[in-house]
Amino acid sequence: MSNPEWKSVGNGHLEGPVPVPDLDPSKLIITRSESLKPIPKPEDLLVFGTIKTDHMLIVSFDPATGWSAPEIKPYGPLSLDPASSCFQYASNLFEGLKAYVGPDGVPRLFRPEKNMARMARSAERLALPPFNPDALLELIKKLVIVDKRWIPNATGYSLYLRPTIIGTRSGPYFRNGTKPISLLASTENVRAWPGGTGSHKLSGNYSPGFLPQRVAIKQGYDQILWLLKDENGSYQVTEAGIMNIFVVVSREDGDLDLITPPLDGTILAGVTRDSVLALANAHTDGKLVLPGIPSNRRLHTHERAFTTADIDHWLTLGRLQEMFSVGTAAILAPVGRVGIKDLKGDIKDLILPSYEDGIGPLSHAMLQMILAIQEGRENFEGWSVRCE
Amino acid sequence: MSNPEWKSVGNGHLEGPVPVPDLDPSKLIITRSESLKPIPKPEDLLVFGTIKTDHMLIVSFDPATGWSAPEIKPYGPLSLDPASSCFQYASNLFEGLKAYVGPDGVPRLFRPEKNMARMARSAERLALPPFNPDALLELIKKLVIVDKRWIPNATGYSLYLRPTIIGTRSGPYFRNGTKPISLLASTENVRAWPGGTGSHKLSGNYSPGFLPQRVAIKQGYDQILWLLKDENGSYQVTEAGIMNIFVVVSREDGDLDLITPPLDGTILAGVTRDSVLALANAHTDGKLVLPGIPSNRRLHTHERAFTTADIDHWLTLGRLQEMFSVGTAAILAPVGRVGIKDLKGDIKDLILPSYEDGIGPLSHAMLQMILAIQEGRENFEGWSVRCE
């Protein structure tokens, strides 16, 4: 996420804080396969995508040195660190286009500039490095020429090309610490939707958040607060970055409400989320005492929807005590500030109550209790499982 | 998509048409690294995910032989075919959990059975093979014991574990042919939504369709017809499988309407979609004559939303002439039947008009014209680009 942002302007370099080389077809290195494969007859090519040609085109990107010299080389496996973002967060995209042999014997591509332009847009959406689409097309044409013998010379048959970009870095994805974080509520990007996959821990749920996160950082916020418009046009709060979210609201009877969005199919069933709910209930039921929280302080847990308007309203009433996000990596992060767009599109900052040490009493209690259980210093319902 | 469906029942075998071995910790092979890495001090571990331990746990699945003997071996890169579905379609998922050392010196995991259960649910959602969650936990415990020296013995520090499943197959993803296909309209799963990534060709948009597609096939349909509920509660038609969708509707004036959903952010800007619209306009404008379509036959193109109720209504009126899906791989597939759930949840089949050869006149004309341009037999606006 800390990569500078580049732009391909077609002059051979990606423009940005530190310019780096753009894709450059003149640097192409071709290493031909020494053992060409037998080519099946067109009528034997019954199943899409099962047979690969002799060669592939590879270019790699390094933030320090830009796009490498492109290589056409024998088709073969890729060797990648298991922590690469292509495996973990699905920072991957692809294109599909076909090559034909014309009546003149020359290989042809169908409107390939459309694919190149879409590929550039996809890369931008995933915060992957930009590239010169014309340069990529030139390189793909070279590959088609090298593998020309694979294009079936029969009507209705073609060679399918599959340009693909995969993220190979495994860089930092969130930071630890208990300094309050700031959230930018996003009305443009929506993490999950009814009927989508937001309740599952799928890689593909993560990379779409990279660009919004980068935009949030640029605007001075740490993470995105994800929203979902409800039937009344209000924005329900769903998650924060890659964490579940809680608010602590004081009640008229002096008790506290601890509220988190329900598992309605758009919310990840976080283990820390479940643990916070269980620990709050255990405190109220007298099964344990959360550190620093009076044993007679009742915590009412609610899995129910709330909106950005609710946050604003609770703050105005002086009832919103704490807001925090939870997840395995950071355990708990207190929220200090939420940027919300008003009707004019201006961002208004909602400021949460501040505390000494930056963390509210219930947030602190939860973090300490969870850490103590995790580290085996406290026991609770067999949550800490020994490896032996 | 043709894999049989298995179920892990905890008896050592995955149950299914042909039972295959489930995950089996008793088969574990441990190969220890010969050169252990130096361990950083806890205070130097500032950035999440940058340093990896000495070992990793690997198990692979083959539909013919089931889960392989698990291996703990030196941490290192994975070697994979570039066409693997983990790169192409993001058939990937992960979990995150942490290991701690307790006061007794024994490594501990925090509620790991929650992660294992969620991982099994994620695998099911992506149509990846099932596994015995208890067996996986047992194997992860072994890995923690092997890499125990990496767990920082300081409060607030832990070793992060990242179980991951990636799809390694590159199997067929769609079939060719002009036999009419059948579509099952899905009200449960939603491909794309406002603020989502449906308009981009991201890998993560594809694997969530694997399971619904499998369900459709089980119910006797070829593909899913993707829907999105609009503000009136009607189901807008968005895409079909991994293709854009068109309907051909006759008008009172004898002309034809050619309608496809608009590029509103939920629809992929398909190259074939764009080509069909352009060719229809060119026919109406007299710039070309589509094969078999009278030159004075006017085709009115519309990029606008339509619903399953509209399809039903047009059919009732006898106005729905043709329906077809388009994409690069198959170019054009005529639709013969659409299964739609009624209010009771029963599936009602809408039957499209049938034609000799299975394909309607406009569908046939489009397919022939696109093929002719792609193969360089016809020229249109420089769409066929020579590689030289």
Image (cartoon, coloured by chain):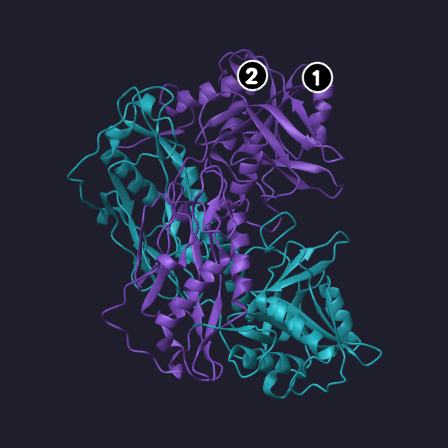
Chain colours: A purple, B cyan
The one nearer the camera, B112 or A138, is A138
Quick check: A212 above or below A37?
Answer: above
Q: Is residue B145 left or right of residue A196?
A: left
User: The residue tagged with tag 1: helix, strand or loop?
Assistant: loop
Q: Earlier in the sequence, mark 1 or mark 2?
A: 1
Residue that numbered label 2 is attached to = A360
Quick check: B287 above or below B52?
Answer: below
Amino acid under label 1? Answer: Gly
Query: x, y percentage for residue B3?
Result: 41, 65
Amino acid under label 2? Answer: Gly
Residue that numbered label 1 is attached to = A318
Q: What residue appears at the point 27 percent right and 67 percent down from the top-left corner?
A: A32
Q: How many marks?
A: 2
Q: Which mark is residue A349?
A: none
Q: Is residue A91 left or right of residue B56?
A: right
Quick check: B75 above or below B322?
Answer: above
The answer to whether residue B59 is visible is no
